[in-house]
Each structure stands twice: as structure tokens, then as C-alpha cells.
Image (cartoon, rainbow, N blue to C red):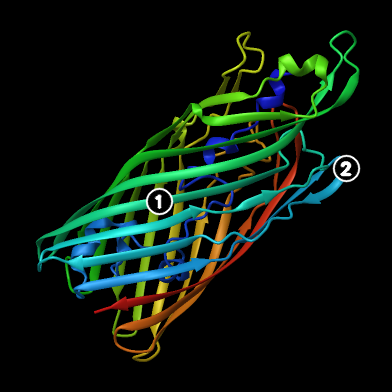
Amino acid sequence: MIKKVFLAIAIIVLAYNVKAEGFAVNLQGNKQVGMGHVGTALNFDASSMQWNPGALATLDQKYSFSVGGFATLIKTEYTGALGKEETDNPTGTPFYLYGSVKVSNKLAIGLGVYTPFGNKVDWGKDWSGKYLIQNIELKAIYIQPTISYQLADWISVGAGLNIVYGEFTLNKEFPIRNPADGSFITNGGVELSGNKIKYGYNLGVFLQPTEKFNIGLSYRSQVDIDLDYSDGDAKFSNIPAAFAPVFPDGGVAATLPMPASFNIGLAYQIDNKWLVSADVNFVQWNKYKSLDFDFENDPTGMLDSKSPRNWDNTMIYRIGAQYSANSKLDLRAGFYYDETPAQKDFYTPETPGANKIGVSTGFSYKFTNKLSLDASLLYINGEKTKATDSTTGFSGEYKNTGWIPGIGVTYNF
């Protein structure tokens, strides 16, 4: 029973993952989000470095700056033996900031700071899955210095270093039972927290075969998130004195691979009004086989656990369009389909994945030739998923929905 307390805490390490399952959606630019979050073959402004570092050298402006943020209004419903329950999540506020400069006609450098995480998930203290999770708060900041070089008029390349700082806090309960007869004594509590800095990279190639047609290729590396005892902490509460030695406070160690992704994008300027673009993202989730925990102050290994995940590789399909209504106003719309890597035999409420669609719209209004206001609105709808975690036996039906408005400004000169 003690081991099972910790088997489903997968979200701890997922807090650091830029492409984690659930509602860790990519929110790194209002223009791109308005077009279904395409961007591999687009070179709007300095924000392009996040999707394809190779695009940065193709910007016409010497200096480019883009800043903005979003409000994540996310809800997950769970229907089980006790009826329907749902999360009561505070609003998350992820943000982004990009700046770039053309050092020469062929060379550009830039710096991006963005937060693919920043949400809070709150199931409540007394919901039916409280032994798996009650609430979690995630924060992550990505810092990306980038360099891009135009090899010829039709091809440019780029590379970026990802410096990732993440922190988390998670609370849950667990039952304490009499070892003699298995009778229930009380509920104990545990708070898990930690922080970590890790490194990765992304590479990009940006092709312009014609003035109207762009092709983008990019690759983001796998990063292994390895929490050691100094990174993760476990604090227990409401533990009877007789059981205190079994639940010692201390460090927690775990490892999870952040998946590599390969992205292909196409963009075509139909005429001076219409721009269309499409992306396909391949995410290598099959590296995530198991989530294992090792508790520092547990010499007997009673608290240590191994929890299988066996996730699958996935594809994300995106398409978007931009319509230039006049010299000041650009209108956008987009759509994507995102496959879930989670298997129904290893399904938990910490990462309630589902195949989902995203529908978006947005606009940019140019106050001057240099300054524009960018806005977007994204709606996410996950298909109903009925699943069971074979490790814990927790089962039910899940439904995910979300609204994400965003606003930002771009300044080019």
C-alpha cells in the first residue's frame, strides 16, 4: 500500500516539459497561435526563432522585438463512481519576450524568453482522486540565445540554446492503515516540490525556393530531466507518531526524458492578401517508458516506486491562414489536431491526455509601420476518454476543454 501512494506522481517531472501532454500547450507568439500555432515556415518577426532559428536571418528589419502574454482558462471534468467532478484552476499567465538584431545582411542574433508552463491545476482536497493528486503549481522559464546565418538568397540556417528553469509544488493525500489488520487509521498528506536548470538545443533550416514559397525544417533535442535529492523535496503531514519513521521528510530523485521533436512547415503567399501555412510536428514520446522514484531517507526502499508509462510517438497536424484586410489590419485563423501519447492502460489524472483539436483566430493592427498590436484566441477541445490506470485501478471518463486569449505587441525598425 505504501508503494502505491507514489506510483502516479508523473506530473512532477512533466512540469519541465515544453511539449507535455494535457494542457501544456505551446504559447510562444500571438501571431502564430492565431494561425493554429504554425510557424516553422514563417518569418514574421523575432518570435520566429522559437519555431525555426534559421528564419531569423531572413527578417527585413535590422531590429525586431515581440512581447506578449496569455490567460489560460482550462478545465478538466472527471466522471466516476461518485458522479461528475471538475478542476477549479486559477488562471495561468504564460508570457514571451523576443529580441533580434541583424549584425550584417547575412547574420542575425537574438534572445527569447518564454514560459511554456505557468498553470495551476486544482482538483480540490476531497475529490475521489485525492490519493493521486489534489493540486499542483507549475512554473517554467525558457531562455534561448539564438544565431542565424543566410548561406544564400534561398537558404538560411540557425541554432538556439535552450536554458530551462522550472519549479513545481504538488499536494496529495494517502491512507494510513493498521499493518496488523489493514484497517483505516487516518489520511496523511505529502507536499512535493523542487526546481531544476537543464539545457537543450534547437536547430533550423529555412528555405525560400521562390519569393512566395517557404519551407521550414527544425529539430528540438531530447533533454533528460534528472532530479536528484538536492532538487526535489518531500514533506509529510498529519502522520501519527507511530508511523513517522516510515514517512521521513527528505529528497526525491527521478528521471524523465523530454522528447525530441522534428518539425516540417510550408508557407505560401497566394497573393498580396492571402498567406497560408501548414506544419507537421513529430514528437518522440516513446522514450518515456517508466517513471521511477527514489526517496532519499528510505533505506528499506519501501517508498521507492516504478510506474510504467510506455507512451507512443505522436503527430500534430496544423494549418493556418492570414488575410491582409488593408495596410493596417491582418486577420488570422487556424486549426490543429494533436494526438495523445498516453495509453489507456496507464492513464492518470495528473496528465489526463486525449486526442484534441484546437481552433484559433487572431489579428494584428499596425498603429505605425513599426508598431503593431497582436491578439489571438484559442479554443481547445479534447475527446472524451474512458480509461483506467492498471497500476492503481483508478478509472473513469475524462473531458478536457480550454479557452486561451492572448495579447502582445511587435516593434520592428
Q: Where's the N terminus, which quadrant?
A: top right
Q: Residue furthest bottom?
A: 326
Residue kind at label 2, given as amino acid type: Leu
243 to the left or right of 32: right
Sort mark 2 into few (<14), some (14-19) or many (20+) by Cα contacts within 10 Å.
Answer: few
Q: Nearer the viewer, mark 2 or mark 1?
A: 1
Residue kind at label 1, given as amino acid type: Tyr
Of residues 298 and 267, the one nearer the viewer is: 298
Q: Which residue is mark 2?
A: 82
Q: Quadrant of residue 346?
A: top right
154 to the left or right of 220: left
Residue shown at 62% from the left, 14% from the top: 298
Q: Quadrant of residue 403?
A: bottom right
Residue shown at 57% from the left, 23% from the top: 293
Q: Which residue is mark 1?
A: 142
Examine the rendered structure and indicate whether residue 234 appears above or below residue 79.
above
Q: Is residue 287 visible?
A: yes
Q: Is residue 291 visible?
A: no
| Residue 174 rendering spot, x and y as whole percentages | 77, 28
Of the two numbered discs 2 and 1 on the same chain, state the one appearing first in sequence.
Answer: 2
Q: Where's the C terminus, which quadrant?
A: bottom left
Sort mark 1 into few (<14), some (14-19) or many (20+) by Cα contacts within 10 Å.
Answer: many
| Residue 314 rendering spot, x and y as whole percentages | 47, 43
Of residues 127 and 199, the one nearer the viewer is: 199
Examine the rendered structure and indicate whether residue 245 appears above or below residue 116.
above
Of residues 80 and 2, the one nearer the viewer is: 2
Helix or strand or loop: what does disc 1 sit on? strand
